[in-house]
Amino acid sequence: MSVATQHAKTFLSDMQRLLGKSEFVKLSRYNEERNWSAYLSLKECHYCSILEWLLSPNEGHGLGDFFLKRLLLAASTTALADPDSAMASRFAARLEAEEWLGIDQVFTHSMQAALIACEIVSTDDLTRIDLLVVDPILRLVVAVERKDGSSVRANQLKGYQRWVKAHYPNYYQLFILSDSQGLMHQFNDAIDWIQLDDSWLVDALKEALIPGRLPTDVHQRMEDLLYRFDTEGEYRDPYFAGIEGELDKFVSDNRDVIQRLRNNPISHIDPRSFITSYLPGLDDTGDEITRRAMVLACRHRALLSDLLARDSFIALSDKLAALSAASPLGFESNDEALYIGTKRMEAAYEAGTISEWPVYVTLRMPSPGISKGETANQAPKTPTLSLTFDMLAMGEDKKDQARQLAKDFGLTPKRRWASKRVELPSEAEILDSPSHLKPWIGDLCALAARLGY
């Protein structure tokens, strides 16, 4: 018997054990994708078109200048988030000189006359501005450069800014770099550009989705967009409400089988590799056992991936707890990430005194295969580690102290959250020897102690 056939027989045996459990059958609904947009692979131009539709005051969403004003609000608050930064000083000076609108003015004036256009050719170098907003009544122009995984090229933003200043010299001017991936772009040659992630859009979509506010068809479109942009929102799959606890319990109750499955290569087969690489050869050789095993692995891939990831995180949590015996840690996990806090934060959350952890480390693992809607270039290749701090946890009256505390720990402050992020070696190396995480756990515990946790 070949090694592949032996793996297949072991896989089928272990899966039969799981399929005989009513809990596994119940959890199998996890294999079903609940929103059609998960299958879309959108490119930068598609995201620009979505923004064009939302920002246009006269489009069919019927919300007028709602999204445009939320974008301008986000830009202003981001620019002024760190009073000690050069960006905040420059933006405050522009407000003082009345070269840009204050937040009160943004919401006082109507922007129904605003016009939106995509792919504006910059005549000096023939490159294209992704999105241009022009209000001829308010005499306002906003240039938006959209990035989704790619970096800004040298002098790219400077060229766009030069074009806007030449064509609209007497208009209020604003320059925004929009990036879903949260990459830290280097654009020292274009210092007036304000970088935003998609959190402003997520907040605006949630605000727009107040029950009864929109016609049914528009409401559904907004929900689809929210699903697309809010990658970690609880609303994403209401069908799965409460399933996290069930998944964790199932892993704990069946660790012997799940650990064997984790070490079995059949468990990591995905439909793409099966139909392109394995199935044709199996049809030729007539290896029905391996064929059956791989078909079963593909049918239950989503659930298996989740269970195996949770089992890995449980094993890693035990090792990390041993590394930090002096400061007991708390853990939460899902199919993609392990969240690490302290036991005191965990207790405060369970007691209802805090609504979320104020500081935490996130270990995010790459997907075992290529997920729905991803291309090979978009799929994460290595684990990533991040430390995140909620600066509002210290109170509204201590924003300056919170911002300084974030800087002391090497975090980059934004509007509410401060964070730092790094890529790690291979997943196997992290799980076998989690020493790479020790300095980050140290920062987590030290920062938590400063907050009283």
Image: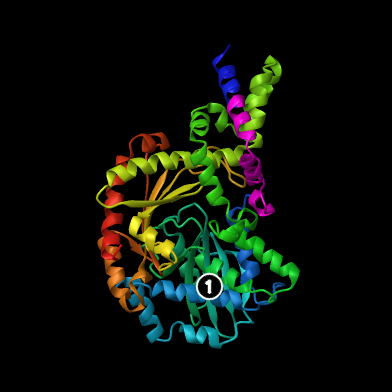
Tag count in the figure? 1
Residue at (69% x, 72% y) in the render: 61
Residue at (51% x, 81% y) in the render: 171
Q: Is mark 1 on a helix, strand or loop?
A: helix
Query: Does 19 appear in magenta?
Result: yes
Magenta span covers which residues?
A: 12-40
Residue at (71% x, 20% y) in the render: 283
Rendered location of residue 282, percent (x, y): 67, 20
How many neighbours does mark 1 have within 10 angstroms: few (below 14), some (14-19), or many (20 or more)?
Answer: some
Q: Is residue 293 visible?
A: yes
Quadrant of the snapshot with the C terminus:
bottom left
Query: Does 133 appear in magenta?
Result: no
When asked about the image quadrant of residue 352, the answer is bottom left
Rendered location of residue 233, percent (x, y): 55, 60
The secondary structure that most of the magenta stretch takes on is helix
Rendered location of residue 86, percent (x, y): 32, 71
- Relative placement, left or right, of 263 versus 131 is left
- Relative placement, left or right, of 316 versus 255 is left
Colour scheme of the rendered structure:
rainbow
Q: In this view, does 130 lie above or below 262?
A: below
Residue at (34% x, 55% y) in the render: 342
Rendered location of residue 344, percent (x, y): 33, 59
Quadrant of the snapshot with the N terminus:
top right
Q: Which of 75 and 421 is in front in this view?
A: 421
Q: Nearer the viewer, residue 118 or 160?
A: 118
Q: In the image, what residue type sits under mark 1?
A: Leu
Q: Name the residue beneath numbered marker 1.
A: 71
